Image (cartoon, rainbow, N blue to C red):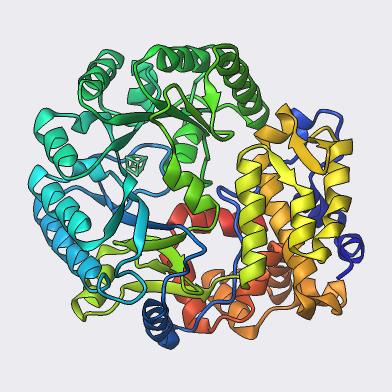
Amino acid sequence: MNLEKYLNGLSPEKRDVLLGNDTSDALHGAFTNKRVVHAGLMGDSIAGEKQQESYELALKKAADQMRQHVVYIHIPFCQTKCLYCGFYQNASKQEVEDKYVEALIAEIKAETSSRQIKDTVIDCVFLGGGTPTSLSPENAGKLLGTIKESFTLSAGCEFTLEGRIHDLVPEKIDVWLANGVNRISLGVQSFNTKLRQRIGRIDTREEVLKRLALLKSYDVTVIVDLIFGLPGQTREMWLEDVKTLAEADVDGMDLYQLNIFPGGALAKAVENGTVPPCADIAGQADMYVASRDYLLDQGVERLSLCHWRRSKRERSLYNTMAKAGADVYAFGCGAGGHFGGVVWMNHRSLADYNAVQEKGLKPIMMAGHSAATKLGMIGDKIISDLEKGFVDYRGLMVMDHRMTELERVLSLWCSRGLMQADLGVYRLTKAGEFWYVSLSQSLVECAQVLWDEDEADMPVEEINGKTNDALDEVLAEMMPESTAESRENILKKMPVAVRMMLRKSSKDTLKTMLASMPAAMRDKMLSSLE
Ligand code: SF4
Protein backbone atom coordinates (compact mmCIF):
# COMPACT_ATOMS: atom_id res chain seq x y z
CA MET A 1 0.00 0.00 0.00
CA ASN A 2 1.23 3.42 -0.82
CA LEU A 3 1.00 5.51 2.33
CA GLU A 4 1.52 8.70 0.38
CA LYS A 5 -1.54 7.92 -1.74
CA TYR A 6 -3.57 7.26 1.39
CA LEU A 7 -2.43 10.44 3.12
CA ASN A 8 -2.96 12.57 0.02
CA GLY A 9 -6.49 11.24 -0.27
CA LEU A 10 -7.47 12.44 3.19
CA SER A 11 -9.36 15.67 3.67
CA PRO A 12 -7.20 18.44 5.24
CA GLU A 13 -9.12 18.09 8.55
CA LYS A 14 -8.68 14.33 8.68
CA ARG A 15 -5.01 14.68 7.76
CA ASP A 16 -4.50 17.13 10.61
CA VAL A 17 -6.21 14.76 13.05
CA LEU A 18 -3.89 11.95 11.93
CA LEU A 19 -0.59 13.76 11.47
CA GLY A 20 -1.09 16.85 13.63
CA ASN A 21 -0.90 20.55 12.86
CA ASP A 22 1.82 22.32 10.94
CA THR A 23 3.05 24.64 13.68
CA SER A 24 6.38 26.01 14.89
CA ASP A 25 5.19 25.58 18.52
CA ALA A 26 4.96 21.80 18.67
CA LEU A 27 4.76 21.61 22.47
CA HIS A 28 1.56 23.64 22.65
CA GLY A 29 -0.06 22.95 19.31
CA ALA A 30 1.24 19.82 17.54
CA PHE A 31 -2.26 18.33 17.79
CA THR A 32 -5.52 20.08 18.59
CA ASN A 33 -6.27 17.55 21.31
CA LYS A 34 -4.92 14.32 22.72
CA ARG A 35 -6.26 11.83 20.16
CA VAL A 36 -7.10 8.92 22.46
CA VAL A 37 -6.65 7.99 26.12
CA HIS A 38 -4.65 4.85 25.19
CA ALA A 39 -3.27 3.96 21.77
CA GLY A 40 -4.15 0.60 20.26
CA LEU A 41 -4.87 -1.52 17.23
CA MET A 42 -8.18 -3.19 16.63
CA GLY A 43 -8.92 -6.47 14.92
CA ASP A 44 -12.27 -7.64 13.53
CA SER A 45 -15.10 -8.08 16.00
CA ILE A 46 -16.64 -11.50 16.69
CA ALA A 47 -20.44 -11.80 16.39
CA GLY A 48 -22.31 -12.25 19.70
CA GLU A 49 -23.30 -15.87 19.15
CA LYS A 50 -19.71 -16.89 18.32
CA GLN A 51 -18.02 -15.13 21.24
CA GLN A 52 -18.29 -17.92 23.84
CA GLU A 53 -17.12 -20.51 21.33
CA SER A 54 -14.12 -18.39 20.26
CA TYR A 55 -13.14 -17.76 23.88
CA GLU A 56 -13.40 -21.46 24.76
CA LEU A 57 -11.29 -22.36 21.74
CA ALA A 58 -8.60 -19.93 22.91
CA LEU A 59 -8.66 -21.59 26.36
CA LYS A 60 -8.10 -24.98 24.71
CA LYS A 61 -4.95 -23.79 22.92
CA ALA A 62 -1.53 -24.09 24.55
CA ALA A 63 -0.19 -20.79 25.90
CA ASP A 64 2.11 -18.93 23.52
CA GLN A 65 5.55 -19.51 25.02
CA MET A 66 7.01 -16.61 23.07
CA ARG A 67 4.99 -14.17 25.18
CA GLN A 68 4.83 -13.22 28.80
CA HIS A 69 1.64 -13.86 30.74
CA VAL A 70 -0.13 -11.61 33.19
CA VAL A 71 -3.36 -11.77 35.17
CA TYR A 72 -5.70 -8.79 35.51
CA ILE A 73 -8.55 -8.77 38.05
CA HIS A 74 -11.11 -5.94 38.11
CA ILE A 75 -12.86 -4.69 41.24
CA PRO A 76 -15.70 -2.39 40.15
CA PHE A 77 -16.44 -0.63 43.46
CA CYS A 78 -15.42 2.73 44.93
CA GLN A 79 -16.36 4.29 48.24
CA THR A 80 -16.97 7.66 46.58
CA LYS A 81 -16.90 8.93 43.00
CA CYS A 82 -14.06 11.25 42.00
CA LEU A 83 -15.19 14.27 40.03
CA TYR A 84 -12.92 13.66 37.02
CA CYS A 85 -13.53 9.92 36.71
CA GLY A 86 -14.95 8.46 33.50
CA PHE A 87 -14.64 4.87 34.71
CA TYR A 88 -16.59 4.80 37.99
CA GLN A 89 -18.90 1.77 38.10
CA ASN A 90 -20.56 1.08 41.48
CA ALA A 91 -20.67 2.36 45.06
CA SER A 92 -19.21 -0.05 47.62
CA LYS A 93 -21.91 -2.02 49.48
CA GLN A 94 -21.03 -5.00 51.63
CA GLU A 95 -23.68 -7.47 50.42
CA VAL A 96 -23.08 -6.56 46.75
CA GLU A 97 -19.33 -6.92 47.25
CA ASP A 98 -19.77 -10.34 48.95
CA LYS A 99 -21.81 -11.65 46.02
CA TYR A 100 -19.36 -10.20 43.50
CA VAL A 101 -16.30 -11.78 45.10
CA GLU A 102 -18.04 -15.18 45.02
CA ALA A 103 -18.81 -14.73 41.31
CA LEU A 104 -15.29 -13.54 40.56
CA ILE A 105 -13.74 -16.53 42.32
CA ALA A 106 -16.04 -18.84 40.33
CA GLU A 107 -14.99 -17.10 37.07
CA ILE A 108 -11.31 -17.62 37.92
CA LYS A 109 -11.72 -21.24 39.02
CA ALA A 110 -13.65 -22.12 35.86
CA GLU A 111 -10.57 -21.39 33.73
CA THR A 112 -7.49 -22.24 35.71
CA SER A 113 -7.48 -25.92 34.75
CA SER A 114 -7.70 -25.07 31.02
CA ARG A 115 -4.81 -25.97 28.74
CA GLN A 116 -4.12 -22.27 28.16
CA ILE A 117 -3.72 -21.32 31.83
CA LYS A 118 -2.84 -24.52 33.72
CA ASP A 119 0.93 -24.58 34.33
CA THR A 120 1.46 -21.29 32.48
CA VAL A 121 3.88 -19.19 34.47
CA ILE A 122 2.36 -15.85 35.42
CA ASP A 123 4.82 -12.96 35.56
CA CYS A 124 2.53 -10.34 37.13
CA VAL A 125 -0.84 -10.05 38.78
CA PHE A 126 -2.64 -6.71 38.83
CA LEU A 127 -5.83 -5.96 40.76
CA GLY A 128 -7.25 -2.76 39.33
CA GLY A 129 -10.56 -0.94 39.34
CA GLY A 130 -12.41 0.79 40.78
CA THR A 131 -10.78 0.54 44.16
CA PRO A 132 -9.47 -2.96 44.98
CA THR A 133 -8.24 -1.78 48.40
CA SER A 134 -11.89 -1.08 49.29
CA LEU A 135 -12.58 -4.83 49.62
CA SER A 136 -13.23 -5.95 53.19
CA PRO A 137 -10.32 -7.86 54.75
CA GLU A 138 -12.38 -11.10 54.54
CA ASN A 139 -13.16 -10.71 50.84
CA ALA A 140 -9.61 -9.56 50.03
CA GLY A 141 -8.24 -12.65 51.85
CA LYS A 142 -10.58 -15.02 49.94
CA LEU A 143 -9.82 -13.48 46.55
CA LEU A 144 -6.06 -13.13 46.96
CA GLY A 145 -5.87 -16.67 48.38
CA THR A 146 -7.71 -17.98 45.30
CA ILE A 147 -5.28 -16.18 42.98
CA LYS A 148 -2.27 -17.63 44.80
CA GLU A 149 -3.68 -21.17 44.69
CA SER A 150 -5.07 -21.06 41.16
CA PHE A 151 -2.15 -19.73 39.09
CA THR A 152 1.49 -20.71 38.79
CA LEU A 153 3.14 -17.47 39.85
CA SER A 154 6.78 -16.91 38.85
CA ALA A 155 9.39 -16.58 41.62
CA GLY A 156 9.69 -12.83 41.07
CA CYS A 157 6.00 -12.29 40.27
CA GLU A 158 4.99 -8.66 40.69
CA PHE A 159 1.65 -8.69 42.55
CA THR A 160 0.00 -5.28 42.56
CA LEU A 161 -3.05 -3.97 44.36
CA GLU A 162 -4.39 -0.62 43.22
CA GLY A 163 -6.29 1.61 45.59
CA ARG A 164 -6.83 4.66 47.71
CA ILE A 165 -4.99 6.15 50.65
CA HIS A 166 -8.13 5.97 52.81
CA ASP A 167 -7.93 2.15 52.89
CA LEU A 168 -4.41 2.05 54.35
CA VAL A 169 -5.24 0.56 57.75
CA PRO A 170 -3.28 -2.25 59.45
CA GLU A 171 -6.17 -4.78 59.41
CA LYS A 172 -6.30 -4.52 55.60
CA ILE A 173 -2.57 -4.19 54.88
CA ASP A 174 -1.83 -7.33 56.94
CA VAL A 175 -4.24 -9.40 54.82
CA TRP A 176 -2.90 -8.08 51.49
CA LEU A 177 0.72 -8.79 52.36
CA ALA A 178 0.02 -12.18 53.95
CA ASN A 179 -1.60 -13.22 50.66
CA GLY A 180 1.19 -12.36 48.27
CA VAL A 181 0.71 -8.68 47.41
CA ASN A 182 4.14 -7.08 47.07
CA ARG A 183 3.32 -3.78 45.34
CA ILE A 184 0.66 -1.19 46.13
CA SER A 185 -0.24 1.54 43.68
CA LEU A 186 -2.14 4.47 45.19
CA GLY A 187 -4.17 7.16 43.47
CA VAL A 188 -3.25 10.26 45.49
CA GLN A 189 -3.75 12.67 42.52
CA SER A 190 -2.73 15.73 44.59
CA PHE A 191 -1.38 16.47 48.08
CA ASN A 192 -3.15 19.83 48.16
CA THR A 193 -6.04 19.40 50.64
CA LYS A 194 -8.32 21.95 48.98
CA LEU A 195 -7.72 20.52 45.55
CA ARG A 196 -8.21 16.96 46.82
CA GLN A 197 -11.56 17.84 48.34
CA ARG A 198 -12.57 19.66 45.19
CA ILE A 199 -12.19 16.46 43.16
CA GLY A 200 -13.88 14.18 45.69
CA ARG A 201 -10.90 12.71 47.56
CA ILE A 202 -11.36 12.17 51.26
CA ASP A 203 -8.11 12.70 53.17
CA THR A 204 -6.11 15.84 53.93
CA ARG A 205 -2.46 16.32 52.94
CA GLU A 206 -1.32 15.46 56.50
CA GLU A 207 -3.44 12.30 56.56
CA VAL A 208 -2.11 11.22 53.15
CA LEU A 209 1.51 11.63 54.26
CA LYS A 210 0.80 9.84 57.57
CA ARG A 211 -0.80 6.87 55.83
CA LEU A 212 2.00 6.67 53.25
CA ALA A 213 4.53 6.56 56.10
CA LEU A 214 2.51 3.75 57.75
CA LEU A 215 2.53 1.74 54.52
CA LYS A 216 6.29 2.22 54.10
CA SER A 217 6.85 0.65 57.52
CA TYR A 218 5.83 -2.64 55.82
CA ASP A 219 7.97 -4.59 53.35
CA VAL A 220 6.13 -3.57 50.16
CA THR A 221 6.80 -1.50 47.03
CA VAL A 222 4.78 1.72 47.10
CA ILE A 223 3.75 3.68 44.00
CA VAL A 224 1.83 6.95 43.96
CA ASP A 225 -0.14 8.47 41.07
CA LEU A 226 -0.53 12.23 40.61
CA ILE A 227 -2.61 14.05 37.97
CA PHE A 228 -1.80 17.39 36.32
CA GLY A 229 -4.42 19.78 34.94
CA LEU A 230 -6.95 19.41 37.81
CA PRO A 231 -9.54 22.20 38.28
CA GLY A 232 -7.88 25.37 39.54
CA GLN A 233 -4.46 23.71 39.71
CA THR A 234 -1.67 26.08 38.69
CA ARG A 235 1.78 25.13 37.44
CA GLU A 236 3.17 26.11 40.89
CA MET A 237 0.64 23.91 42.73
CA TRP A 238 1.56 21.04 40.44
CA LEU A 239 5.29 21.47 41.03
CA GLU A 240 4.64 21.60 44.78
CA ASP A 241 2.88 18.22 44.52
CA VAL A 242 5.75 16.73 42.52
CA LYS A 243 8.31 18.02 45.04
CA THR A 244 6.30 16.59 47.96
CA LEU A 245 6.19 13.24 46.22
CA ALA A 246 9.87 13.29 45.26
CA GLU A 247 10.70 13.84 48.95
CA ALA A 248 8.21 11.25 50.27
CA ASP A 249 9.39 7.73 50.98
CA VAL A 250 7.87 5.99 47.95
CA ASP A 251 9.46 3.70 45.36
CA GLY A 252 7.79 4.96 42.21
CA MET A 253 5.47 7.59 40.82
CA ASP A 254 3.11 7.89 37.88
CA LEU A 255 2.37 11.39 36.59
CA TYR A 256 -0.76 11.52 34.44
CA GLN A 257 -2.41 14.13 32.28
CA LEU A 258 -6.06 14.81 33.22
CA ASN A 259 -8.61 13.62 30.66
CA ILE A 260 -11.83 15.61 30.67
CA PHE A 261 -14.82 13.67 29.33
CA PRO A 262 -17.30 15.98 27.56
CA GLY A 263 -20.62 15.85 29.38
CA GLY A 264 -18.97 14.17 32.40
CA ALA A 265 -19.29 15.41 35.99
CA LEU A 266 -16.09 17.48 35.83
CA ALA A 267 -17.01 19.19 32.55
CA LYS A 268 -20.44 20.04 34.01
CA ALA A 269 -18.97 21.32 37.30
CA VAL A 270 -16.61 23.63 35.38
CA GLU A 271 -19.45 24.77 33.15
CA ASN A 272 -21.75 25.69 36.03
CA GLY A 273 -18.92 27.28 38.03
CA THR A 274 -18.92 24.79 40.93
CA VAL A 275 -15.18 24.29 40.39
CA PRO A 276 -12.61 26.53 38.70
CA PRO A 277 -11.56 25.75 35.11
CA CYS A 278 -8.90 23.17 34.32
CA ALA A 279 -5.67 23.98 32.49
CA ASP A 280 -6.09 23.86 28.72
CA ILE A 281 -3.92 21.56 26.63
CA ALA A 282 -1.12 24.17 26.37
CA GLY A 283 -1.20 24.65 30.16
CA GLN A 284 -1.00 20.87 30.61
CA ALA A 285 2.02 20.81 28.28
CA ASP A 286 3.80 23.39 30.46
CA MET A 287 3.03 21.35 33.58
CA TYR A 288 4.38 18.21 31.91
CA VAL A 289 7.66 19.90 31.02
CA ALA A 290 8.01 21.50 34.48
CA SER A 291 7.72 18.19 36.34
CA ARG A 292 9.83 16.31 33.80
CA ASP A 293 12.68 18.81 34.07
CA TYR A 294 12.45 18.95 37.87
CA LEU A 295 12.58 15.18 38.35
CA LEU A 296 15.45 14.71 35.88
CA ASP A 297 17.35 17.46 37.72
CA GLN A 298 16.77 15.57 40.96
CA GLY A 299 18.24 12.43 39.41
CA VAL A 300 14.95 10.49 39.54
CA GLU A 301 15.03 7.64 37.03
CA ARG A 302 12.44 7.39 34.26
CA LEU A 303 11.05 3.94 33.40
CA SER A 304 8.68 5.39 30.82
CA LEU A 305 7.43 8.84 29.89
CA CYS A 306 4.83 8.77 32.72
CA HIS A 307 6.50 6.48 35.19
CA TRP A 308 9.43 7.29 37.47
CA ARG A 309 11.24 5.34 40.15
CA ARG A 310 13.21 6.32 43.22
CA SER A 311 14.27 2.82 44.23
CA LYS A 312 15.30 -0.27 42.33
CA ARG A 313 12.57 -2.37 43.96
CA GLU A 314 10.07 -0.66 41.63
CA ARG A 315 10.00 -2.56 38.32
CA SER A 316 6.60 -1.59 36.84
CA LEU A 317 6.40 -4.98 35.16
CA TYR A 318 2.66 -5.19 34.59
CA ASN A 319 2.49 -1.91 32.71
CA THR A 320 5.57 -2.74 30.64
CA MET A 321 4.48 -6.27 29.78
CA ALA A 322 0.84 -5.43 29.03
CA LYS A 323 1.95 -2.65 26.65
CA ALA A 324 4.56 -4.88 25.01
CA GLY A 325 1.99 -7.52 24.03
CA ALA A 326 1.95 -10.00 26.94
CA ASP A 327 -1.09 -12.30 27.03
CA VAL A 328 -3.56 -10.91 29.56
CA TYR A 329 -5.89 -13.33 31.38
CA ALA A 330 -8.62 -11.07 32.71
CA PHE A 331 -11.42 -11.63 35.20
CA GLY A 332 -14.17 -9.52 36.69
CA CYS A 333 -16.89 -7.06 35.76
CA GLY A 334 -15.47 -4.63 33.17
CA ALA A 335 -12.13 -6.47 32.81
CA GLY A 336 -10.63 -6.94 29.37
CA GLY A 337 -7.80 -9.12 28.08
CA HIS A 338 -6.39 -11.00 25.11
CA PHE A 339 -4.73 -14.35 24.42
CA GLY A 340 -4.91 -17.15 21.85
CA GLY A 341 -5.99 -14.76 19.07
CA VAL A 342 -9.02 -13.42 20.98
CA VAL A 343 -9.42 -9.98 22.51
CA TRP A 344 -12.47 -9.37 24.69
CA MET A 345 -14.08 -7.30 27.37
CA ASN A 346 -16.40 -8.53 30.13
CA HIS A 347 -19.74 -6.86 30.87
CA ARG A 348 -19.41 -3.53 32.68
CA SER A 349 -22.85 -3.72 34.24
CA LEU A 350 -22.83 -5.77 37.44
CA ALA A 351 -26.31 -7.18 36.72
CA ASP A 352 -25.26 -8.42 33.24
CA TYR A 353 -21.97 -9.75 34.58
CA ASN A 354 -23.73 -11.73 37.34
CA ALA A 355 -26.49 -12.99 35.03
CA VAL A 356 -24.07 -14.46 32.46
CA GLN A 357 -21.59 -15.70 35.03
CA GLU A 358 -24.37 -17.57 36.92
CA LYS A 359 -25.03 -19.58 33.76
CA GLY A 360 -21.44 -20.80 33.91
CA LEU A 361 -20.41 -18.75 30.85
CA LYS A 362 -17.63 -16.21 30.43
CA PRO A 363 -19.38 -12.85 30.97
CA ILE A 364 -18.27 -11.43 27.61
CA MET A 365 -19.68 -8.07 26.51
CA MET A 366 -17.74 -7.81 23.25
CA ALA A 367 -14.96 -9.73 21.59
CA GLY A 368 -12.77 -9.61 18.53
CA HIS A 369 -9.90 -11.38 16.82
CA SER A 370 -6.56 -9.89 17.83
CA ALA A 371 -5.07 -7.89 14.97
CA ALA A 372 -3.17 -10.27 12.59
CA THR A 373 -0.31 -11.63 14.67
CA LYS A 374 2.57 -9.83 12.99
CA LEU A 375 0.68 -6.58 12.69
CA GLY A 376 -0.22 -6.96 16.37
CA MET A 377 3.49 -7.31 17.17
CA ILE A 378 4.29 -4.22 15.10
CA GLY A 379 1.56 -2.26 16.91
CA ASP A 380 2.79 -3.47 20.32
CA LYS A 381 6.34 -2.44 19.42
CA ILE A 382 5.30 1.03 18.30
CA ILE A 383 3.25 1.59 21.44
CA SER A 384 5.73 0.20 23.95
CA ASP A 385 8.72 1.96 22.35
CA LEU A 386 6.95 5.31 22.21
CA GLU A 387 6.03 4.94 25.92
CA LYS A 388 9.78 4.95 26.46
CA GLY A 389 10.35 7.92 24.17
CA PHE A 390 11.44 6.58 20.77
CA VAL A 391 10.45 4.77 17.56
CA ASP A 392 12.79 1.98 16.49
CA TYR A 393 12.36 2.57 12.76
CA ARG A 394 15.04 0.08 11.69
CA GLY A 395 13.48 -2.58 13.90
CA LEU A 396 10.06 -1.98 12.32
CA MET A 397 11.57 -2.26 8.81
CA VAL A 398 13.14 -5.57 9.76
CA MET A 399 9.80 -6.84 11.07
CA ASP A 400 8.05 -6.01 7.80
CA HIS A 401 9.32 -4.28 4.66
CA ARG A 402 6.06 -2.35 4.24
CA MET A 403 6.87 -0.39 7.39
CA THR A 404 9.68 1.37 5.46
CA GLU A 405 7.03 3.85 4.36
CA LEU A 406 6.49 5.03 7.93
CA GLU A 407 9.59 7.17 7.39
CA ARG A 408 7.36 9.61 5.52
CA VAL A 409 5.41 10.31 8.71
CA LEU A 410 8.42 10.17 11.06
CA SER A 411 10.33 12.67 8.92
CA LEU A 412 7.35 15.01 8.92
CA TRP A 413 7.24 14.87 12.72
CA CYS A 414 11.00 15.57 12.82
CA SER A 415 10.48 18.68 10.70
CA ARG A 416 7.79 19.79 13.18
CA GLY A 417 10.04 19.44 16.22
CA LEU A 418 8.42 16.32 17.68
CA MET A 419 11.28 13.89 16.99
CA GLN A 420 14.97 13.71 16.10
CA ALA A 421 16.45 10.97 13.92
CA ASP A 422 19.52 9.19 15.24
CA LEU A 423 21.01 5.95 13.87
CA GLY A 424 17.70 4.58 12.65
CA VAL A 425 15.90 5.50 15.86
CA TYR A 426 13.55 8.48 16.13
CA ARG A 427 13.78 10.00 19.61
CA LEU A 428 11.02 12.19 20.98
CA THR A 429 11.77 15.79 21.82
CA LYS A 430 10.14 17.30 24.94
CA ALA A 431 7.20 18.30 22.74
CA GLY A 432 7.02 14.78 21.26
CA GLU A 433 7.02 13.33 24.78
CA PHE A 434 3.97 15.37 25.72
CA TRP A 435 2.09 14.20 22.59
CA TYR A 436 3.31 10.60 22.61
CA VAL A 437 -0.14 8.97 22.93
CA SER A 438 -1.38 10.83 19.85
CA LEU A 439 1.81 9.94 17.95
CA SER A 440 1.40 6.27 18.93
CA GLN A 441 -2.21 6.14 17.80
CA SER A 442 -1.40 7.80 14.47
CA LEU A 443 1.58 5.57 13.81
CA VAL A 444 -0.30 2.32 14.50
CA GLU A 445 -3.09 3.53 12.22
CA CYS A 446 -0.54 4.18 9.45
CA ALA A 447 0.99 0.73 10.07
CA GLN A 448 -2.48 -0.79 9.79
CA VAL A 449 -3.10 1.00 6.48
CA LEU A 450 0.25 -0.28 5.16
CA TRP A 451 -0.57 -3.77 6.33
CA ASP A 452 -4.08 -4.23 5.10
CA GLU A 453 -3.75 -5.56 1.57
CA ASP A 454 -7.50 -5.46 1.37
CA GLU A 455 -7.47 -1.71 1.66
CA ALA A 456 -4.36 -1.39 -0.49
CA ASP A 457 -6.02 -1.29 -3.84
CA MET A 458 -9.16 0.45 -2.71
CA PRO A 459 -9.65 4.10 -3.63
CA VAL A 460 -9.24 6.29 -0.57
CA GLU A 461 -12.77 7.65 -0.87
CA GLU A 462 -14.04 4.11 -0.61
CA ILE A 463 -12.00 3.33 2.52
CA ASN A 464 -13.23 6.52 4.11
CA GLY A 465 -16.84 5.81 3.36
CA LYS A 466 -16.72 2.07 3.70
CA THR A 467 -18.97 0.78 6.45
CA ASN A 468 -21.97 -1.46 6.80
CA ASP A 469 -25.67 -0.75 6.92
CA ALA A 470 -25.86 -2.11 10.47
CA LEU A 471 -23.63 0.66 11.79
CA ASP A 472 -25.67 3.29 10.01
CA GLU A 473 -28.87 1.85 11.48
CA VAL A 474 -27.45 1.80 15.02
CA LEU A 475 -26.24 5.39 14.73
CA ALA A 476 -29.64 6.44 13.38
CA GLU A 477 -31.31 4.89 16.44
CA MET A 478 -28.89 6.57 18.82
CA MET A 479 -29.04 9.93 17.08
CA PRO A 480 -32.63 10.28 15.85
CA GLU A 481 -31.98 13.89 14.81
CA SER A 482 -29.21 12.86 12.43
CA THR A 483 -29.54 12.66 8.64
CA ALA A 484 -28.00 10.07 6.34
CA GLU A 485 -25.52 12.73 5.30
CA SER A 486 -24.51 13.69 8.86
CA ARG A 487 -24.06 10.01 9.75
CA GLU A 488 -21.92 9.51 6.69
CA ASN A 489 -19.78 12.42 7.87
CA ILE A 490 -19.44 10.84 11.30
CA LEU A 491 -18.25 7.61 9.75
CA LYS A 492 -15.74 9.41 7.55
CA LYS A 493 -14.17 11.03 10.59
CA MET A 494 -13.63 7.79 12.48
CA PRO A 495 -10.01 6.65 12.81
CA VAL A 496 -9.20 4.08 10.16
CA ALA A 497 -8.58 1.36 12.79
CA VAL A 498 -12.03 1.86 14.32
CA ARG A 499 -13.70 1.94 10.93
CA MET A 500 -12.01 -1.28 9.87
CA MET A 501 -13.26 -3.04 12.98
CA LEU A 502 -16.79 -1.65 12.97
CA ARG A 503 -17.57 -2.31 9.36
CA LYS A 504 -17.61 -6.08 9.93
CA SER A 505 -19.69 -6.02 13.12
CA SER A 506 -23.31 -7.17 13.31
CA LYS A 507 -26.05 -4.83 14.49
CA ASP A 508 -26.35 -6.67 17.83
CA THR A 509 -22.62 -6.49 18.47
CA LEU A 510 -22.51 -2.79 17.62
CA LYS A 511 -25.46 -2.05 19.90
CA THR A 512 -23.91 -3.95 22.80
CA MET A 513 -20.56 -2.26 22.28
CA LEU A 514 -22.00 1.24 22.23
CA ALA A 515 -24.52 0.64 25.01
CA SER A 516 -21.93 -0.79 27.36
CA MET A 517 -19.32 1.92 26.90
CA PRO A 518 -19.10 4.33 29.86
CA ALA A 519 -21.58 7.10 28.98
CA ALA A 520 -18.93 9.82 29.12
CA MET A 521 -16.67 7.89 26.76
CA ARG A 522 -19.48 7.19 24.29
CA ASP A 523 -20.55 10.83 24.34
CA LYS A 524 -16.96 11.89 23.77
CA MET A 525 -16.66 9.56 20.80
CA LEU A 526 -19.89 10.71 19.20
CA SER A 527 -19.36 14.40 19.98
CA SER A 528 -15.82 14.37 18.64
CA LEU A 529 -17.15 12.84 15.46
CA GLU A 530 -19.84 15.42 14.84
S1 SF4 B 1 -11.32 5.77 42.93
FE1 SF4 B 1 -10.60 5.61 40.82
S2 SF4 B 1 -12.21 4.44 39.74
FE2 SF4 B 1 -13.09 5.17 41.69
S3 SF4 B 1 -14.12 7.07 41.16
FE3 SF4 B 1 -12.05 7.63 41.89
S4 SF4 B 1 -10.79 7.67 40.01
FE4 SF4 B 1 -12.71 6.60 39.49
- Residue occupying the point 66% across, 43% down: 386
Quadrant containing the N terminus is bottom right
* Side (left or right) of 293 relative to 453: left
x and y percentages locating residue 250 in the rendered image:
36, 22
Q: Quadrant of residue 163?
A: top left
Q: Is residue 371 left or right of residue 343?
A: right
Quick one: 330 or 352, which is closer to the camera? 330
Image region (quadrant) for ligand 1? top left
Q: Is residue 385 visible?
A: yes
Q: Tell me: 150 left or right of 523.
A: left
Residue 436 in percent (x, y) is at 67, 40
Give the residue drawn at x 29%, y 70%.
118
Q: Residue at x 36, y 15 (%)?
A: 248
Check the image and report above or below for 476 versus 167: below
Query: Does residue 461 lie above or below 384 as drawn?
Result: below
**Residue drawn where x is 38% and y is 37% of the image:** 83
Name the spot of residue 209 as percent of width and height, x first. Answer: 28, 16
